[in-house]
Amino acid sequence: VVLAKFYARELDMGQVNLPFAVAAVAGFLALKERREVLAAVLLVLTIAIKPYGALLLPALLIRRHQAATVMAGVGVLLLLALPVPLYGWSGTTDLHQTWWRTVTDTTAPNLLNPDNISLASMYAKWLGVGTVSAALGTVSAAVLLGVAALVFLKRGLVASPEGLEGSLLLLLIPLLSPQGWDYVLLIATPAIVYLANYQDLLPAPWRALTIVAALTIGLSLFDIMGRAAYAAFMGAAVISVCALVMVGALVTLRARAVT
């Protein structure tokens, strides 16, 4: 109900966020089973699929497992060097630099795209593209990363912390990526599962907010709302706000030592 439209959009666009999510979930399951090296391989695989998989690596590094840390470092270096046999060292360097320029040069023009749900886009839609919205987006991103760090610091409260931590990081990715398209939210499937499973253990206000946010995301369909209403809905960055509500709910579950 919540994510079906994003799965459909993913398949229609021919994207690879679904295999990214599968690799990430498998990596966190490996962490839960203390198969650290396997987890390192799987999390590096997410970076090979989508570079924002790098956001997941702190979940591995915080465990201070030497072999896994070395494996992750070697894996990232191998990814960077993979084009060398085809392009040579200078060509590979140029390839990475060109990729980076493409990402950065297309970020600003896409901030007002209706399908962009990133924090940067949210503030740009509310305040216009400029220094104020950019600053607010940067500060908010830093706050979210700080909140995620606090969740990790509270991992001793529960027996198996990996699931919620992985779910939180996956939910944060489309919010932190400047070009966080709405269908990327499908990688937040584990987060939705956690919230559905533990919603009865949330405080009543958070439970109500979470249910409303989830249904708002899932039932805001272009074919039902119509062009004008849907454009206004997306232009108001409502889905971004709903995603932030779910972030708050996950943090609340950890604060209450539920999971």
Image (spheres, rainbow, N blue to C red):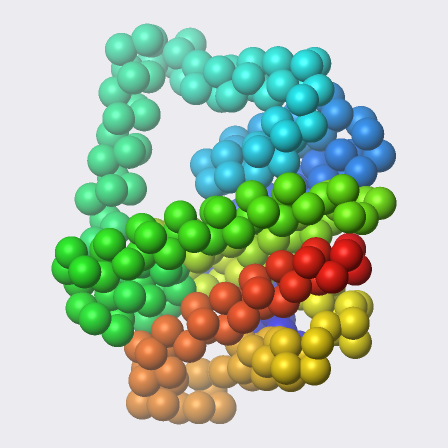
Percent coordinates x, y for residue 12 in the rendering: 50, 62
Residue 64 visible from this viewpoint? yes
Pick the quarter of the image with the C terminus. bottom right
Position of residue 25 relative to residue 194, above or below, is: above
Q: Is residue 33 left or right of residue 216?
A: right
Position of residue 70 relative to residue 254, above or below, is: above
Position of residue 147 relative to residue 204, above or below, is: above
Residue 10 visible from this viewpoint? no
Percent coordinates x, y for residue 213 in the rendering: 56, 78
Pick the quarter of the image with the N terminus. bottom right
x 43%, y 68%: residue = 240
Percent coordinates x, y for residue 257 in the rendering: 77, 57
x 25%, y 30%: residue = 98
Position of residue 208 relative to residue 128, above or below, is: below
Q: Is residue 111 left or right of residue 194?
A: left
Q: Is residue 70 left or right of residue 49?
A: right
x 63%, y 30%: residue = 62
Name which quarter of the figure residue 248 lies in: bottom right
